[in-house]
Amino acid sequence: TVIRNITGVEFTNGRVLAAGQCNEEFASKIYSLPLPLTHGKSAAIYSTETYHVAHGRWETRAPIQSFVPYVEDGKNFIVGSFSCTPIAKFPIDDIDSGAQIKGTSVVELGSGNRPVDMFTYEKDGKQWLVTNTDRFHHSRRPLGPSQYWGVRVDMSYLGAKDINEDAARRDVSKQAGPDGIEVVESLFFAKHVAKLSNKEMVVLRDDEGTLDLEIAPLP
């Protein structure tokens, strides 16, 4: 097996999680390494299968582009997003290395986008998931003033009953909709974004070819 790329790394519950892609038929992978990291220690490796809502089919090759750890009812998951742009969750407890994990797609943000970063925050008692994307279809089907844009999603969607082919789809004709899925105006032109607190985020913004580092309020 040859690892082609690593698309994201996170720390959670005594281990390092990484998402990436290899040269196998089930190319999309999740790697789990226990802490502390020591030389020669091997990762547990899981293959992922995900329903890509915009494509209308299950896929195994596209890697998770951005993800966050997530706990639901005491169980550990990762929540990840892919190009074209489903948001899905994957269980990672009590799974043997080499296993194939079938994800649950809960939200579709629209085709033609590549997720870049992802984080969660809480406001007024509600949990939100934020992801920014690079729209590679911007020149022929723009969604706004920049190919770089972002959205926030009410995390209650992670427990939705309507999943996979029935998952909620963002209304691409509007800034918001369905309820709990909203384009974030302050993420236009944002190439990278990270959570600073539950009130603020750090934004690396494209300004006509130069990059500005900003602190921006969370919506």
Image (tube, rainbow, N blue to C red):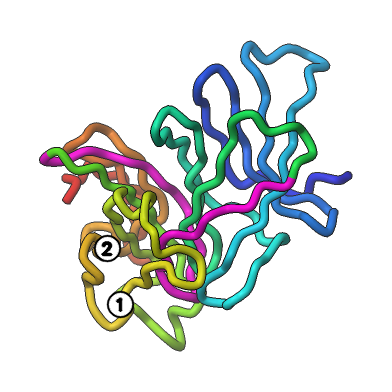
Q: Position of residue 16 (x, y in %)?
A: 60, 26
Residue lying at 46% horizontally and 58% vertically, measured from the top left: 87
Q: Is there a contact, CB below 8 Å, between mark 1 and mark 2? A: yes
Q: Is residue 215 magenta?
A: no
Q: Is residue 42 left or right of residue 17?
A: right
Quickly name the residue at label 2: 181
Quickly name the residue at label 1: 171
Give the camera-side residue of 54 and 210. Answer: 54
Q: Visible in this render: residue 209?
A: no
Q: Is residue 120 magenta?
A: yes
Q: Is residue 6 left or right of residue 117?
A: right
Q: Visible in this render: residue 123?
A: yes
* Earlier sequence position, callout 1 versus callout 2: 1
Numbered tag placed on residue 215 in the rendering:
none
Residue 164 lies, with reference to residue 205, above or below; the image says below
Q: Is residue 28 left or right of residue 77?
A: right
Q: How many marks?
A: 2
* Residue lying at the far left of the rendered structure: 124
Q: Position of residue 113 (x, y in %)?
A: 48, 69
Q: Position of residue 119 (x, y in %)?
A: 37, 42
Residue 21 lies, with reference to residue 125, above or below; the image says below
Instruction: Estimate the spatial distance between the alpha carbons at disc 1 and disc 2, rounded to whole Å.
Output: 9 Å
Residue lying at 51% horizontally and 38% vertically, measured from the top left: 77
Q: Amino acid at mark 1?
A: Asp
Highlighted range, magenta: 100-124
Q: Position of residue 102 (x, y in %)?
A: 63, 52
* Residue lying at the far right of the rendered structure: 1
